[in-house]
């Protein structure tokens, strides 16, 4: 399934990396993969080693990390992320061309009636609330920020419909600020991969940030989402099906019970 990560090759040792019990050479900031990786099937990995393995697998699987929500600029990204709450990105991408045609910027969006916004996003969950928030958010951008999307967590989270996760996505994808937006899907995978035992997305975000190099956060966030979509649905697996968990936990016998966020 992962030909680029087959048995028999090595993780290249870089200056400053450290040999571990299981034979890994860890260099958190600069590790690279040379050819393939030899998974250590007989040894239980420690958390740090699992993190390195996960990062290597995800980099091999998803070398490119395109932003899944279609947008033109920071404003349209913010709106798209707001609309994606409890909705698939695919659904959001179906409605945003019409919405952004009539409301391409805060001035145009703020001048629309709520009903006009609602008409374009009706097929999304929570459409009424979202339409109200989109219009009010555009107004507040004009009132508070000269029509610009603010590049700070505090100011973003003060906007209607914008929670910490939405603000994190915008900070990461619009402004390139390292953030690790954790939703219920990333929370679930972090547990299944033994990277966090957090009982909330807040705790899981804290754990993942402590585990991975800061400069990798934005890329990893997207890669984990991609893996979740392709392999790891909420109900589809008990943690023993695909190669990721089998390599991380070769001796896993019992199904994984995931704590809900
Ligand atoms: S084995 Fe199951 S839980 Fe683990 S990554 Fe694969 S699909 Fe997800």
Image: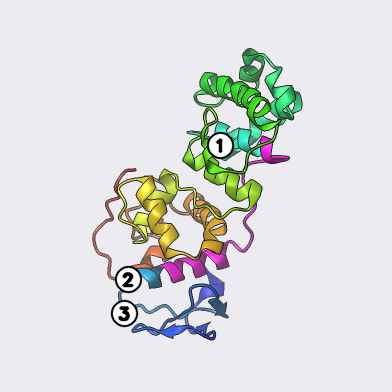
**Residue at coordinates 55% horizontally, 72% vertically from top-left?**
3
**Residue at coordinates 38% horizontally, 57% vertically from top-left?**
207
Question: How packed is label 3: few (under 14 Cα within 10 Å), some, or many (20 or more)?
Answer: few
> Is residue 60 inside the magenta stretch?
yes
Question: How packed is label 2: few (under 14 Cα within 10 Å), some, or many (20 or more)?
Answer: some
**Dots 1 and 2: beta carbons under 8 Å?**
no
**Residue at coordinates 49% horizontally, 55% vertically from top-left?**
224
User: In the image, residue 141 lies at what x, y percent?
Assistant: 65, 29
**Dots 2 and 3: beta carbons under 8 Å?**
yes
Q: Judge left or right: residue 90 versus residue 255.
A: right
Q: Tell me the residue that label 1 is attached to.
A: 155
* Secondary structure of residue under mark 3: loop
- Whichever of labels 1 and 2 marks the residue nearer the N terminus, that label is 1
- As drawn, 61 above or below 154: below
* Secondary structure of residue under mark 1: helix
Of badges 1 and 2, the one in the foreground is: 1
Give the spatial CA distance, label 2 vs label 3.
Answer: 7 Å
Please tell me which residue lies in front, 156 or 2.
156
Task: Kindly indicate the quadrant of the structure image that contains residue 99.
Answer: top right
Q: Tell me the residue that label 3 is attached to.
A: 42
Residue at the left extreme, as displayed: 254
* Secondary structure of residue under mark 2: loop
Residue 77, numbered circle: none
Task: Kindly indicate the quadrant of the structure image that contains residue 111.
Answer: top right
Colour logic: rainbow
Of badges 1 and 3, the one in the foreground is: 1
* Extent of the magenta region: 51-75
Give the spatial CA distance, label 1 vs label 2.
Answer: 45 Å
User: In the image, residue 180 lies at what x, y percent?
Assistant: 49, 52
User: Quadrant for ligand 1?
Assistant: bottom left
- Whichever of labels 1 and 3 marks the residue nearer the N terminus, that label is 3
């Amino acid at each position: 399934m992962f030909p680029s990560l087959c048995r028999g090759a090595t993780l290249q040792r870089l200056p400053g990396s450290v040999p571990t019990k299981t034979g890994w050479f860890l260099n958190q900031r600069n590790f690279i993969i040379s050819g393939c990786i030899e998974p250590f099937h007989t040894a239980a990995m420690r958390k740090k080693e699992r993190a390195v393995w996960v990062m290597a697998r995800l980099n091999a699987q998803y070398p490119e990390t395109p932003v899944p929500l279609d947008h033109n600029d920071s404003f349209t990204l913010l709106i798209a992320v707001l609309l994606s709450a409890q909705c698939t990105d695919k659904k959001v991408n179906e409605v945003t061309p019409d919405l952004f045609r009539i409301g391409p910027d805060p001035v145009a969006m703020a001048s629309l009636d709520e009903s006009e916004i609602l008409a374009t996003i009706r097929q999304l969950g929570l459409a009424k609330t979202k339409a109200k928030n989109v219009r009010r958010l555009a107004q507040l951008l004009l009132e508070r920020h000269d029509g610009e999307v603010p590049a700070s967590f505090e100011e973003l989270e003060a906007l209607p419909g914008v929670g910490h996760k939405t603000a994190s996505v915008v900070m990461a994808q619009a402004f390139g600020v390292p953030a690790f937006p954790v939703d219920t899907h990333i929370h679930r995978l972090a547990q299944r991969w033994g990277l966090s035992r957090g009982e909330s997305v807040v705790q899981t975000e804290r754990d993942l940030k402590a585990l991975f190099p800061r400069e990798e956060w934005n890329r990893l966030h997207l890669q984990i989402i991609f893996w979740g979509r392709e392999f790891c649905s909420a109900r589809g697996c008990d943690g023993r099906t695909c190669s990721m968990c089998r390599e991380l936990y070769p001796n896993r016998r019992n199904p994984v019970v995931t704590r809900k966020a």
